[in-house]
Image (cartoon, rainbow, N blue to C red):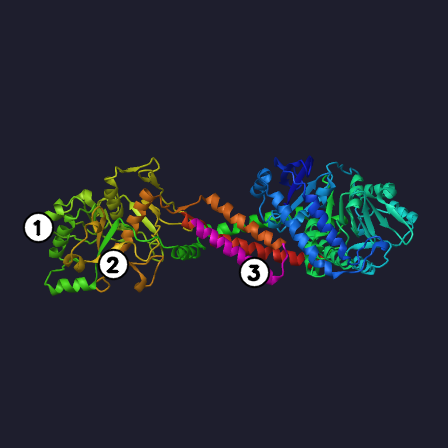
Amino acid sequence: MGKLVVMKFGEGSFEQGFAVTLQIGEEHERAATEITGKLPSFPQMPLYYSRWQSSYRQIGNRYRLHADKIQVTNVSMIQDCENTSHILRARFNTWLRAEEFRPLREKWLERLSSTDEVRVILQTENSQLQLLPWHLWDLLERYPKAEIALSSPSYDRIHKPRTLNKLVNILAIVGNSKGIDTQADQALLQQCSNAEVSFLVEPQRKELTDHLWGKNWDILFFAGHSSSHGNGESGRIYLNKTDSLTIGELKYALKKAIENGLQLAIFNSCDGLGLARELADLQIPQIIVMREPVPDQVAKEFLKYFLEAFAGGESLYQAVRQARERLQGLEDRFPCATWLPVICQNPAQIPPTWDELRSATIEDIPNLPLPSRGRFRTTLLSSLAITMLVCTVRLLGFLENQEIQAFDLMMRSRPPEGLDPRLLIITIDDDDLAIQRQNNESLIGASISEKSLNKLLAKLNQYQPRAIGLDIYRDFKAKEPDLITRLQQTQNLIGVCKGSDSSGNIKGINPPPEIPPGNLGFSDFIHDRDGVIRRHLLFMNQETTSLCSTPYSFSLQLASLYLRSSGIQTKFTPEKNLQLGKTIFVNLKSRSGGYQNIDANGGQILLNYRSSKEIAEQVKLTQFLSSPVNLSAIKDRIVLIGVVAKGDSPDTWPTPYGIPLDEQMPGVLVQAHMISQILSAVQDGRPLLQTWSLWGEVVWIWGWSLIGGILAWRRLSLPWLLFAVGVTSSVLYVVCFGLLISGTWVPFVPSALSLVAMVALLSIYNSKTEVSGQ
């Protein structure tokens, strides 16, 4: 819906200044905003206009003035006219940037967007204010869809209902055309589609009044000579070579025409503001006039451009603006041509479109879309049916693979977040294994020898890490006494074990015997049907016979130990959700996001991988043991120890970042992502991945099916329709991607499917109705 702006000028003068009231609102509604202000005194403004007007009229470009006043073209005056126009424009905008007027200007900028279509009505009785080139106001020029009209403060609505004509009825008066070419005007009017034009060429007064009384006219058009008198208070048109009339002398005939539905008067003639003032007293809805003498060529071009835009579907104001601005192409020969056309508006009336001037019927317009109410009903029912179908298919699990693949793509596309500074990972790769063997260190049952592990733990404890995570299975007793003691007494050391699962015939793995039970965490990962790890298991109830009895995951144990020094304890909500500080980790349900029937036992959440090529700073085991260590690299960090070797029984897992074996992620890095997720959510407010409720997702999918229906309404050609669907689908993807970054996984594939299905269904329906209607 367009915007309506009304600027009311109260009592005042250029010597005293003017009180101004600004109203802003929607079309067809009362103004939502009103503010008062003032334009300061500027006694020189009328003088600037008078100088420009004088230089403009001296040019003499075959104006449509009274035939006796037609002058001979004098191109030497063009430069002087352009100079005075630049001065007038500059002084005019300086005046409108006055401090007293600033609040109105700022309110305008606050309430109106540059993309809005804006009708601006300037209400004033001051004829000199009306003469000023308001279209050159720098504020107005920021709004490409805005056009200004003049109005009297006194107006009234015509209450008699208008009888619609099947065609736009135009009464075209061609007056005295001495020295000008009115044949072009007649030819342009005859080309108008869905219009019936009646021409009166140089009529007598009685003939004109009879026509005004005799038919329901929509548009009154005049081409010929005219002029204004009495400082723009009245005007005169020249009917033929001997007769001329004022508007007052046509008062009763014009009143009758207005009562019968006359909507628009176009005076494509000179100096028309006087004509407009008198017509406004008769409450005619809209008038288009030329504010100054108009060259014959400019008048013809304006009419051509205006009719082309208005009959082509543009609003009245937009048609005038387009036609006025296109006159700029003539300003090398006819300076200030774009200044001339101006709308005079009855504020009580709403400008009609070309189609609203006539009673269009189904027979008039081939391939007419369904009436709005029927089309809306069809679209609504179709969208509901498609939404139900798509949601049913989704609930049966047929879209799960596609949704998860889209999820993976979005996860990989997120911007990098950088390394987590709270973690340090000591990795054991193939070189580390080889060096241990070269040193005759026993690796039976583990990836790190007892000698290297003892040395590693001793060195780590010197630098006071907040927690140490040994992500290596040690289901056997240590042999070296020093290592046994160190494992027993290192209070910030967390070891791993693996739970048993009788249903999957998984026996589990015992924990290191030396590490206290309170310092153990299970290393079990939850993977999807394709083997990819997308979920994070925080806690679970172990089987009675499980070799690993701890209920908490390795990642949770390490994160809890790290947070404990900040006074954050692990607890559970009444809904059995884990809570750390103010952060609640809401458990997944069997139907969550794209998942339709997963095993949701235990405390599972979606794993929001930290979007980085590397999760944290890494150092190789051999390098760490043989090199000096920076205190800040370890102190108060979580140090993870794990295997990244690819040769001896590699511990790698498929993730959204890579499924093939050579792209899989080592388990210790997966654990690092899990720990980072917990710490970042609690300490940094980084979003945990959540999903909407089932009904929230249904409404979302339904909304995109409705958007598909709107696209189908447009009845675009197939290439444009495919382009529109592609653009809309891209917007949908970007929205879903943005929501995922902010922490919400919303349905992309079902929404895109409902959008495309809706467009296809209604397009087929539209084509069949068109064929049956032919």
How far from the left and from the top, in percent, is residue 755? 54, 54
Say few, some or many: other residues with alpha carbon within 10 Å of mark 1 (under 14 / 14 to 19 / 20 or more).
some
The residue lying toward the viewer, choosing from 562 and 602, is 562
Residue in front for this viewpoint, 121 or 20: 20
Q: Main secondary structure of the magenta part?
A: helix
Query: Which amino acid is tagged 2?
Result: Asp
As drawn, 707 above or below 348:
below
Which numbered marker is on residue 482? 1
Give the magenta range: 714-739
**Is 464 drawn above or below residue 649 in the view shown?**
above
**Which residue is label 2 attached to?**
651
Location of mark 3 (residue): 723
Which x, y percent locates residue 355? 73, 51
Taking depth in this image into account, of 761 and 632 the one nearest to the observer is 632
Provide residue 146's location: percent of width, then percent of height: 64, 48
User: Residue 589 occupies which quadrant of the picture?
Assistant: top left
User: What is the distance, in whole Å, between disc 3 and disc 1 at their CAs?
Assistant: 72 Å
| Foreground disc of the pair 2, 3 | 3
Q: Secondary structure at mark 1?
A: helix
Task: Using the image, tell me which numbered label, if any, was put on residue 89.
Answer: none
